[in-house]
Image (tube, grey):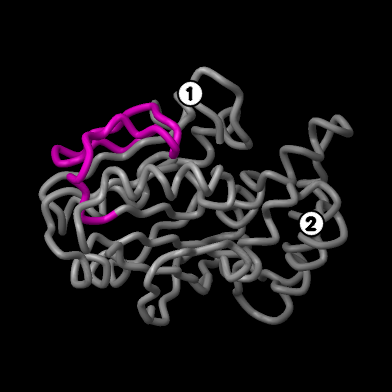
Amino acid sequence: MQPAEQPFKDHFSDSAAAYAARRPSYPTALVDFLAEVAPRRELAWESGCGSGQLSVLLAGRFEQVIATDASAEQIAQARPHPNVRYAQAPAEASGLPAAVVDLAVAAQAAHWFDLAGYYAEVRRVARRGAIIALATYATMSIDDDIDRVVKRFYLDVVGPYWPPERRHTEDGYRSLPFPFEELPEPELEMRAEWALADVVGYVETWSAVRAMARATGRAPIPELRRDLARVWGPEAAVRPVRWPLALRVGRLS
């Protein structure tokens, strides 16, 4: 991303309300782990916070959370919490004072950042021994039949419209540079209980779906719903949905 007054890689402002409503929540085990390894629990900074899915969870373990995003539309949809202060700011220029942050975290966002600028900002605002954590997830899993339909849509239908940065989520951020003393991370997953409409609504928030609609004038969501309905069963049936959660966690010396 670039400074706030300049364009940034904005794939979600035009769907901020849907993003807030449809994206899955992070597990409490994630914030428990981050709070455990942080040197203190006074201040956490989440950059690229979107609508605050993780921010409000962090507020249960840290005294204060500063949650920033370059998108004013995303911040406008953020979930309020008395211990969370939201601000529009790019990841590379948080506006925070130096040496105050115990945890710097970015969830499903770091692949959009100017990483060199973000890492420099993390080093500036972090206390000695603070933690930096990048979290990401790729495709969901429900069952073999449904997964095949979703995978075909992901790869073959909207595949050409994924931004190139998407590849970093698919390999769990292992292809991103991470110049920190890396810590072992736990195995975690995100979970939801969704009906068919929830799955379709979530897929509609994908950046590739939005890009296809802009390029061609439409996105084949009705066809996806039809194909899913054939293997879903009763439309109102609720099924467990899982996303493996990948982490890169480091300590600043």
Q: Number of labelled discs? A: 2
Using the image, tell me which numbered label, if any, was put on residue 131: none
Between 34 and 1, the residue placed more toward the observer is 1
**Dominant SS in magenta:** loop
List x then y, in percent, for residue 98.
22, 39
Q: Which residues are magenta?
A: 77-103
List x then y, in percent, for residue 216.
89, 33
Residue 97 forms part of the magenta stretch: yes
Between 57 and 122, the residue placed more toward the observer is 122
Query: What residue do we see at 64% from left, 61% from top?
Result: 168
What residue occupies the far front of the structure in this picture? 253
Using the image, tell me which numbered label, if any, was put on residue 226: 2
Q: CA distance from mark 1 to mark 2?
A: 41 Å
Q: Secondary structure at mark 2?
A: helix
Is 228 rendered above or below residue 1?
A: below
Dividing the picture into quadrants, the one containing residue 7 is top right
Between disc 1 and disc 2, whose residue precedes? 1
Density class for disc 2 (Cα within 10 Å; few <14, some 14-19, many ≥20) is: few
Q: Secondary structure at mark 1?
A: loop
Is 65 rendered above or below residue 217?
A: below
Q: Amino acid at mark 1?
A: Ala
Residue 177 forms part of the magenta stretch: no
Q: Quadrant of the N terminus?
A: top right
- Residue placed under numbered mark 1 in the picture: 4
